[in-house]
Image: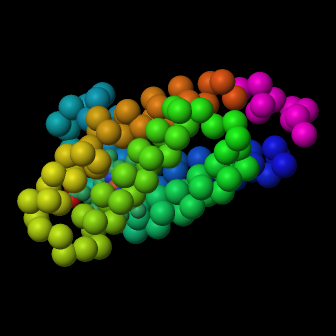
Amino acid sequence: MVLIGLSWGLVAASLFLIANLYVTINLLAKIFFGKRKFKWLRKMESAWHYIHYVGNMSAFTAVSLHLLFFESLANYVNWTLVAFEAWLVFCGITIRFTKAPVKLKNVFRKLSMTWYMFSAFIILLVVSHLPFLPLMIFPFPK
Ligand code: HEM
């Protein structure tokens, strides 16, 4: 059971990594190179949109399955993380796929698709998994 639960976690992490590869590289480029423009990064941006949408939706599905196996172990930080991701996916879908008013979309944008929300999510992701490190070491408990 632990192995299946961990596998869903691995699937979720891999999908998340692929879905947000452009976001991560763009953030690192801004940190290390400031306003310098990279042609290949602009090209990657235009190619990445659908990978970002489909990847994040699939990652969230995998996270839900991961949680299904470890629900009894989940702490408050884990639940906050899931709610946080649900919020990001909800905002992303509203911004991209609905005809919601532009003003509302702009508010959602600031509260989701920004470097600070992305960084907060990554920090929460790491911190919330620290108590489970012993579970991730082979041989896994039953
Ligand atoms: C299915 C879910 C998602 C959809 C449909 C979606 C959609 C979008 C859209 C349309 C943009 C461009 C926003 C704009 O017009 O300025 C965007 C950018 C962004 N998204 Fe998402 N998103 C989703 C999930 C996520 C998640 C889960 C994260 C973070 C963990 C995230 C992080 C970001 C970031 C940081 C940007 C800004 C990228 C940049 O320009 O550097 N998104 N997303």
Residue 13 image point, x, y percent: 59, 47
Q: Which residues are magenta?
A: 133-142
Corner quadrant of residue 119: top left
Instruction: Tell me the chief SS of the magenta region.
Output: loop
Residue 41 magenta-drawn? no
- Identify the residue shown where x is 47% and y is 58%: 56
Name which quarter of the figure residue 30 lies in.
Answer: top left
Q: How many marks?
A: 0
* Residue at x-position 30% and y-position 28%: 32
Residue 141 vertical placement versus 16 (above, below): above
Q: Work out whether residue 46 or residue 58 is closer to the camera in this orientation and state it.
A: 58
> Could you tell me residue 110's position as x and y percent?
20, 46
Horizontally, is 23 left or right of 134 in the view?
Answer: left
For the residue pair 21 and 104, the one nearer the viewer reads as 104
Q: Is residue 136 magenta?
A: yes
> 86 or 126: which is nearer to us?
86
Question: What residue is rendered at 53% in x and 33% in y?
Answer: 76
| Rendered-image quadrant of the C terminus | top right
Q: Quadrant of residue 101?
A: bottom left
